[in-house]
Image: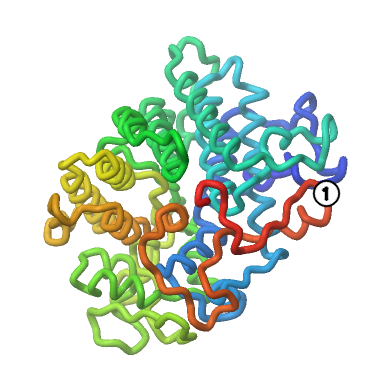
Amino acid sequence: MLVALLLTGLSSCKKGDDFYISPNAPLAATPATMLAACEVGTFNNLEGYTVKIASIWMQNSSGVLNYAIQIEQYAPTESDMDYVWNPLYLNMNNCKQIADLYGAKDPYYRGISSVLMAMNLGLATDMWGDVPFSEAFQGASISFTPHFDPQQAVLSSIQTLLDNAITDLATDVSANQDLPGADDFVFGGNTSSWTKVAWTLKARYYNRLSKKAGYDANIVRTYLANGITSNADNCYAKHGNGGNESNDWAAYINSRGYIVSSQVLIDSMGNMADPRTPCYYDTISNGGGAPGTAVGNPLGDLNSDVSYWGPYLGGIVDVAGNTNPAKNIVLVSYAEAKFLEAEAKVRLADATAFTSLNEAIMADVSEVTQGANTGSSIATYTATNTTVHTVILEKWKAMFANPVESYSDYRRTGFPMLTPNPNSLLTHIPTRLPTSQQERISNPNAPTPSLDTPVWYAQ
């Protein structure tokens, strides 16, 4: 964490020479320390407040106290966006520094940093639409007021980053002066694993184009053929240090607790009929409900006397109140790959789509329950009831730790069919986050679309 904080001085969106550090006079760093910092920064971003907003809007969770009520009522503030926008761009700048400073002699480091860059950039464009990229990270050498790239161009840039990563990770080991190892918290320097993640991410971000002319579901299947093929390939945000390093979900519960479970998702899962429920939610000290059940906050209510997160996110584990705050959180999974495959097959009228959907459900149940349950009891789809609707519905249940994926699916497909909060300030779920206040004030090129302006891929 300290390394990450020390390196976050490398900024592109902060304004002023005091925030700019020339690549020609870098901090005393190595590719190893910078990669560690970029990975920790990515973990923070993909577990942080932005993701929890998506969790509330997708009704996986419910905001019942303090500023989480504003999110529940579809009223995020510009000033709150500063706290998530700035870390995203600080971390992406660090990823770029790895490529610029060390890429020529260390293509493996550049390849991993490119995958990390794609993951952070993907989060930014999913939540804000048009975002700076082509003119970002240049500092005083060009401008502190970058233009915002259209989302279509950003998605293309993500594909280029991932293509370049795949190429770098395929180079011969002898082409690398330094090799990633323990400094790569995710895969320990295993380039094959990173390559599978890159291909799966290519499928994820290409599938964002499903509403656009020229979209070809066969391309999704081609990308997935080179991607993650089992839960053993899953990409995790790694936490540890003897349990002293909490993941952001568990830290949030312990320090704030403003977000609780949502009755909407609990009901959709049939409460305890789904083997993931006691993993997602605390079904023991559950706000006074019957032992062995999950109790959620009803849509539009503000009741904090309900279940909090369970062991899957590092919450309550047993009756003694034991927790596992250092629980590793999955970021890219085999289950997601199979859901993408199932959707592609449905769009291609492939009669085996139901097989992929059932495999996706079972892969997720196995992941969530740590192998204690196969998921066969709920993976019962057939050729006649497998549609885009059912695929996205089941994916929503599975993407509990990755609600940005559900939020992206919801905006481009309309599924799952959620009822907006009746006590909110809008009549529908917002389609994006507001522009960061700091960016709006200091960057004249920053757009300020309303919360009901769809991002490009949802139009």
Q: Is residue 287 left or right of residue 273?
A: right
Residue ranking furthest to the right: 17
Q: Is residue 387 left or right of residue 330?
A: left
Q: Quadrant of residue 12?
A: top right
Name the spot of residue 256 as percent of width and height, x first.
55, 74
Q: Is residue 225 left or right of residue 189?
A: left
Colouring convention used in this rendered image of the protein: rainbow
Local SS, label 1? loop
Residue 40's place in the image compared with 396, above or below, is: above
Q: Residue at x 21, y 67 (%)?
A: 274
Q: Residue at x 41, y 59 (%)?
A: 414
Q: Residue at x 29, y 65 (%)?
A: 279
**From this viewpoint, is residue 37 visible?**
yes
Dot 1 corresponds to which residue?
444
Tag count? 1
Disc 1 crowd, CA 10 A, few/some/many (<14, 14-19, 20+): few
Q: Quadrant of residue 294?
A: bottom left
Residue ranking furthest to the front: 213
Residue ranking furthest to the bottom: 288
Name the spot of residue 48 as percent of width and height, x first.
54, 58
**From this viewpoint, is residue 326 visible?**
no
Q: Amino acid at mark 1?
A: Pro
Q: Residue at x 50, y 11 (%)?
A: 175
The one nearer the camera, 141 or 356, is: 356
Name the spot of residue 329 as percent of width and height, x first.
40, 53
Residue 292's place in the image compared with 5, above or below, is: below
Name the spot of residue 421 as percent of width and height, x first.
48, 77
Q: Is residue 311 left or right of residue 424?
A: left
